Amino acid sequence: MLARRLARPALLLVALLVAACGGAPASGAPAASTAASSLPATGAPATTPPTPTALTVGLGYIPSVQFAPFYLADQAGYYRDAGLTVTFQNKIDPDLVTLVGQGSIDIGLADGTSVIPAVSQGIPVQYIATIYRDFPSIVFAKATSGITSAADLKGRKIGIPGRYGSSWVMLQALLGSAGLKATDVQIIEYPTYGQGAAVQQGAVDAATGFFNNEPVQLKLAGFNPVILHVDSIVALPGPGLISSKTTLSTKGAAITAFVAATLRAMSDIAANPTLGLDATIKVVPELAADRAAQAAILNATITAWKGTAANAPAMGTIDIAGWTASAAFMTTLGLVANPVKVEDLVRSDMLPH
Amino acid sequence: MRSTVLLSLACAAAFLGLWKLIVVVGNYPPFILPSPEAVIARFIGAWADGTMAPHAAATLLEVALGFTVGAGSGLVVGYGLGRSSIVARLVSPYIVAAQATPILALAPVIALWFGPWLLGKVVIAALIVFFPVAVSAMVGIRSVDARLLELGRSLRASRRQVLLTLEIPAALPSIFGGLRIGVTLAVVGAIVGEWAGADRGLGVLVNIARGSLFDIPLMFATLGTIAMFGVALYLVVVLIERRLIRAR
């Protein structure tokens, strides 16, 4: 009788344990390497072509023209020629970093300002290539608002998605440069990213946004934007490619090939933006309804990739000094739980030489 | 009573043990599934260093006000639905439609109308509490024995006397069934409201822990705090129910 009563709970426990054993991969267990093998020597009998390495790539929240290099590299065969088959997923930044750290996603496009606190919390990711040379998160306002510098934000209403993420870090850096704190302004949250519309409608005086999005939309709506950048205050690391330490050790060759192919597509788009626009429209046909707006966003994005500073380094290059300064700055904001070394945050050996 | 407490503690220990077993057997890293001891340590640390308290206070206020407004209006409307078939036929479709619309979809719109401040959160919490309380009140009022009402009328009892001495006491068990559900939903509503826009609250702390700090033990500790609030408030309603129904 007792045995029968205990049977069901015991079966449930066994089921849970089986699920746990078959769940997330052990963080230290290397995945089987599927890197493409070398080509057979000349004159050797024909062999089956090497199996392409499958990579899962995490991009941002929703498919967008900002991810044009990835779409172009895929459609133009750059990934295929590098022996890769690539699958894209769209995730928000916090989920992306965690999933990359876990190994469920091989490579992600994530904010550099997310990597620093993530690594400080023990998430084993590293930043391997810069995609945005200029930090894309900015504060923008209508030119008629009278806001021309960070000091002018005092006492004003500022729209922000939330008190987290790259926009929050950037805003604190900007306010700090003028001796201000978040309590010196009125923060209005727009969790569904409606702060651009809020600026247009006058609900807020200024808002955080991305250099290649909200100010472009504001200009297209007939308002001249004012943009406040943080780059001259602290060189915060912009979005770039990240991967986990385990993935980098087991799929290093494939990751290097992916980075090279992506940078190649970025160069092609910088030379001819129409390539990127057409590649994106193949993925998101709805964007064709407003090509002009998407082209404007892409042009602004290209500017952010290349960087506006004089003598900006080659695309992909990682600014080690900037990372060191950023980690120190974010520590002062209380976002870095445990001290981090820059060599834990970034590695440059995945870049094409 | 003592055996119930011991059994509850044993269940809690078994839950924590199972959690630990899953972490160990699955070899989950802390940023995917932290161990129970890591979450408990973070929970204690967050309360000790002042991280949790202001957010918890903000959420409690939203829950209290949202529950009061939602339950109060639910009781009034529920009484009307129970007493008048015309009211029931006219109003019921709108109430059911409002309940069927996911609050997660409505929350951003409500935040837009009422702003990202306390009022918006109270409205969202009240909306989610309203339906179960209204329905339980309606069912309770309709279940009042007709012979009791006839007896009251024959004794020339006033409307107020019928309400206070016959209808409400008879409907209490059903009403408290709705209040039990409503109070836990008030916590859900407050958190959803915070996700639609807030500068403090346990829902905000979940987002900060997850999206800015990558402090997953803190996220779990915050979720644990939210769950504890729900359980505590539920027990408060149960205690009040026992006192009132015993006193009938």
Image: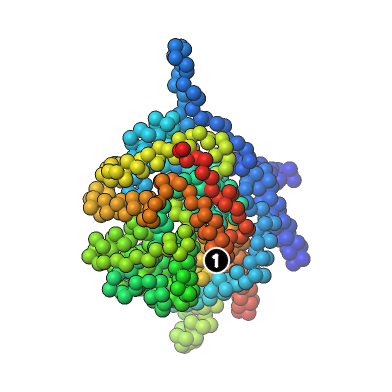
Q: Position of residue A344 (x, y in %)?
A: 59, 49
Q: Report the front residue among A293 and B64.
A: A293
Task: For label 1, count other residues whose C-alpha is less than 10 Å away and answer few (under 14), some (14-19) or many (20+).
Answer: few
- When the figure is inspected, residue A296 is found, relative to residue A152, above or below; the finding is above
Q: Residue at x 45, y 73 (%)?
A: A178
Judged left or right of residue A29, residue A208 is: left
Q: Amino acid at mark 1?
A: Leu
Which quadrant of the structure image shows residue A261?
top left
Q: How is the image coloured?
A: rainbow
Task: Give the residue pinned by disc 1.
Answer: A333
Q: Residue at x 63, y 41 (%)?
A: A28
Judged left or right of residue B198, residue B52 is: right
Using the rendered image of the protein, determine whether residue A102 is visible from the camera's viewpoint.
Answer: yes
Q: Report the front residue among B105 and A316.
A: A316
Q: Residue at x 68, y 61 (%)?
A: B41
Q: Chain of mark 1?
A: A
Judged left or right of residue A330, residue A294 is: left
Disc 1, SS: loop
Identify the residue at the far front of this view.
A311
Q: Position of residue B65 (x, y in %)?
A: 50, 77
Q: Residue at x 71, y 45 (%)?
A: A6
Which quadrant of the structure image shows residue A193?
bottom left
Q: Report the front residue among A183 and A178.
A: A178
Q: Position of residue B228 (x, y in %)?
A: 62, 66
The total number of labels drawn is 1
Q: Position of residue B84 (x, y in %)?
A: 38, 74
